[in-house]
Image (tube, helix red, strand yellow):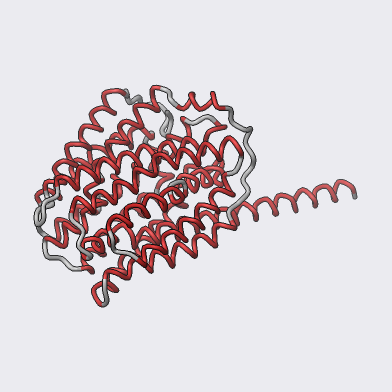
């Protein structure tokens, strides 16, 4: 009887544990869905909004660059705070709610100086959200981290749906609606953030342990990843403007962004197969080469079909690169500094990398001629790939290994 009781309790405990894990994974999926849903409004259309209210190319590039630059400082600040004090979840909720409240102020101004200041303050709280979400995902996935792409794909699906719908809405109404739409989705994400899981506590990190993040492999990876995101500055900052200058409307612009994200979803869903066959470093190296080709095509292409075909390469230049980078950094970071590791990765790439990319793109931009931006992007991606390949030797060892 006692043996049967023990078995029953054990079975019940396992069932509860599995149920909790499934619930936690669903919470992470919802956060990805909402976070990238808001990005589906912001990335393709916010700079078009800025162009409509009279901002110059340099002002648009500066706003984008400042937003990215704030990521550098505050994603690291919040990451250190989370790992040192064990406050990842409270900080995530705080920053989700505060950034949403601050975004609402964009409804009341079109003044460049005020928007610049607001971008800085807003960015201070928005900065850690994605790196914290990646760290939560790594904890929740545990031994199934190779399936990260399938969880992250929920964000890409949201991006696809939102970017297509908003493109049609803008054609019918006005691009100014993007501010209200970002606010609405961000508010839902902030409320949903209160359901974030309380992941198992790690041993509190000590200050000197963060130095272990800066191994030779980590430094080279971050340098090359920085160059990769510099090369994306023209795409994230001026691709929609580039298409508009070629005579395309909001629906086509939305379709191009959605096509890229669809390709991204395909590779993310198949991430277990990808990383079973290729190491993280091989995937990263291939991503640089494909990025150089993609930006080179955008430099010369005017045909709608060629532009749309080039968007399929987003599967590699973002989808595969992003997954490999997140998983590679998770392996490189000490157990006590997982949040800081993802924050550092995010700061150097989407912070510093995009800051430089936006500033350079804004400086190179000329009204009516955005193509040269993509020539710079191609050269930068190629430089990152050469550096990465020269440093690493690619053995035929186990796929997915360091």
Task: Say which quadrant the C terminus sits in.
Answer: top left
Residue 360: where, in percent of width, then height? 20, 42
Name which residue lies at 23% across and 54% down.
Answer: 60
Name which residue lies at 59% across and 49% down.
Answer: 90
Residue 109: where, in percent of width, then height? 33, 64
Looking at this view, name the residue that lies furthest to the right. 1
Left or right of 374: which side holds 83? Answer: right
What is the quadrant of residue 325 in the picture? top left
Residue 93: where, in percent of width, then height? 55, 53
Q: Is residue 105 visible?
A: yes
Q: Is residue 165 visible?
A: no
User: Can you say whether 391 is above or below 14 in the image?
Assistant: above
Name which residue lies at 26% across and 40% down.
Answer: 356
Name which residue lies at 37% across and 67% down.
Answer: 107
Residue 20: where, in percent of width, then height? 65, 54
**Which residue is more in the foreground, 250 or 321?**
250
Left or right of 356: which side holds 402? Answer: right
Left or right of 176: which side holds 303? Answer: left
**Which residue is more in the foreground, 309 or 278?**
309
Left or right of 358: which side holds 76? Answer: right
């Amino acid at each position: 009887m006692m043996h049967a009781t023990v078995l029953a309790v054990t079975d019940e405990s396992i069932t509860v544990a599995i149920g909790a894990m499934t619930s936690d994974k669903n919470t992470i999926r919802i956060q990805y869905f909402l976070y990238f849903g808001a990005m589906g409004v912001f990335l393709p259309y916010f700079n078009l909004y800025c162009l409509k209210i009279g901002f110059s190319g340099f002002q648009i590039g500066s706003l984008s660059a400042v937003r990215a630059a704030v990521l550098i400082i505050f994603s690291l600040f919040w990451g250190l705070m989370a790992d040192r004090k064990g406050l990842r979840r409270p900080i995530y909720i705080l920053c989700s709610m505060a950034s949403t409240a601050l975004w609402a102020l964009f409804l009341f101004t079109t003044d460049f100086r005020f928007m610049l200041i607001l971008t800085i303050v807003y960015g201070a709280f928005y900065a850690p959200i994605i790196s914290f979400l990646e760290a939560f995902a790594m904890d929740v996935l545990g031994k199934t981290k190779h399936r990260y792409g399938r969880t992250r794909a929920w964000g890409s699906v949201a991006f696809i749906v939102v970017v297509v719908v908003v493109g049609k809405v803008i054609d019918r109404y006005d691009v100014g609606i993007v501010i209200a739409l970002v606010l609405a989705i961000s508010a839902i994400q902030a409320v949903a953030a209160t359901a974030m899981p309380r992941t198992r506590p790690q041993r509190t990190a000590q200050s000197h342990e963060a130095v272990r993040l800066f191994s030779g492999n980590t430094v080279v990876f971050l340098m090359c990843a920085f160059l990769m995101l510099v090369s994306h500055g023209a795409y994230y900052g001026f691709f929609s403007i580039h298409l508009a200058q070629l005579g395309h409307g909001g629906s086509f612009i939305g379709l191009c962004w959605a096509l890229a994200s669809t390709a991204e979803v395909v590779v993310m869903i198949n991430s277990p197969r990808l990383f079973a066959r290729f190491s993280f470093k091989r995937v990263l190296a291939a991503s640089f080469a494909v990025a150089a080709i993609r930006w080179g095509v955008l430099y010369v292409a005017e045909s709608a079909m060629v532009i749309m075909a080039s968007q399929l390469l987003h599967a590699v230049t973002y989808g595969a690169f992003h997954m490999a980078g997140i998983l590679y950094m998770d392996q490189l970071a000490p157990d006590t500094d997982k949040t800081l590791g993802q924050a550092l990765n995010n700061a150097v790439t989407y912070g510093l990398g995009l800051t430089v990319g936006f500033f350079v793109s804004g400086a190179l931009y000329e009204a009516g001629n955005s193509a040269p931006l993509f020539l710079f992007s191609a050269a930068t991606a190629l430089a990152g790939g050469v550096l990465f390949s020269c440093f690493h030797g690619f053995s035929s060892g186990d796929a997915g290994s360091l």
